Amino acid sequence: MKKLLICLSILLVPLVAGAAYDDVSLGTSAIISVNDSLGNPVSLTVSGSADVVESIIVGSTSFIVGLQSGSTLKVVSTGRNLLSTDAPAANSTIACSSTQSSITLTATSGITATVNVSPNACSSGTSTSSNNGGGGPIANFGGGGGGSTTPATPVAPTTQATMAQLQAMIASLTAQIAALGGTPSAGPGTSPMSFMSNTKLIVGSKGADVMNLQKFLNSDPDTRVSSSGAGSPGKETTTFGLLTKKAIQKFQVKYGIAGPGKVGYGNFGPATRAKVIELSK
């Protein structure tokens, strides 16, 4: 460790980079070489009034500077290393930009302060904070305790959480509907394309399309599949039987689509489907 005493005449000394962490030469602007905590060399540019800098003692990962009252010393790291100090808040300002990090020490009265160097980089974008003792500027990770920090941006709810809430709501609504003894029925105002395919349905057909067709027919008392039991509102089935056929026939007669002896009477074909689409708009 090497202690350097600074006097006014040192302003005439040219800028020279140090070869090791305890080698330093100063002028109006000087280079101090230290190692970070990982052993990587870090070059710091130090500038200020040499006649009021009493001393600089360079260590392996930090340096100690003594300042007279009214003096200012600025330390710059072009590698954007995280800098911190134990100087009081009124005597230090730490800044970080996209090109460099810096710390400025201002002595309102004589002070002795330690400047620490971390291998961590300060955060992107320009930000300035006053140190309140032992802390450092905003960092990507790590950093000293007690320094000013930027509040973390609140994390928006994840997609998984949102979907889980939606699924829970759907399950709750389904349970309430089941408790009332039925399920929502498709009918006028419901797009048929949303609840049935274009497959022709006849006696013997099975599947979800049949159930949805029964729900549609049950939405109108004139075309209801059954008033009770299987096929009645809330108890629709997936089988196209004679009750469904009779309900289709009532629908076809009501809207003049087909009648006894006509082709397609009792089947859910193109003409009947077209009328369902018309009523569903």
Image (spheres, rainbow, N blue to C red):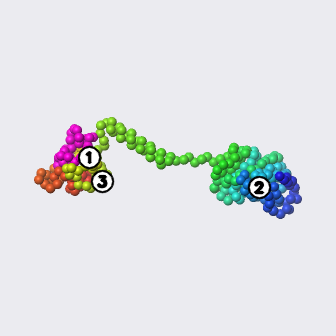
- Which stretch appears magenta? 221-250
Q: Residue 8's quadrant in the figure?
A: bottom right
- Of residue 220 and residue 141, the one placed in the foreground of this image is 141
Q: Main secondary structure of the magenta part?
A: loop
- Of residue 206 and residue 158, the one placed in the foreground of this image is 206
- Left or right of 79, for residue 15: right
Question: Residue placed at 21% from the left, 39% from the top?
Answer: 227
What's the CA distance linking mark 2 and mark 3? 73 Å
Q: Is residue 47 above or below residue 217?
A: below
- Residue most extreme to the bottom: 14
Say what amino acid the circle numbered 2 marks: Val
Q: Nearer the viewer, mark 1 or mark 3?
A: 1
Q: Is residue 99 above or below residue 130?
A: below
The image shows residue 17 at horizontal and vertical percentages of 79, 61
Q: Residue 167's quadrant in the figure?
A: top left
Say what amino acid the circle numbered 1 marks: Thr
Residue highlighted by disc 2: 34
Residue 141 belongs to the span the image colors magenta: no
Q: Nearer the viewer, mark 2 or mark 3?
A: 2
Whichever of callouts 1 and 2 sits on the residue coming sooner in the sequence is 2
Residue highlighted by disc 1: 238
Whichever of callouts 2 and 3 sits on the residue coming sooner in the sequence is 2
Question: Residue placed at 73% from the left, 54% from the top?
Answer: 39
- Residue most extreme to the top: 179
- Residue most extreme to the left: 261
Say what amino acid the circle numbered 3 marks: Met
User: Are the residues flagged by discs 2 and 3 in contact, CB closer than 8 Å?
Assistant: no
Q: Which mark is residue 198?
A: none
The image shows residue 257 at horizontal and vertical percentages of 17, 53
Residue highlighted by disc 3: 193
- Left or right of 233, for residue 19: right
Residue 219 in view in this figure: no
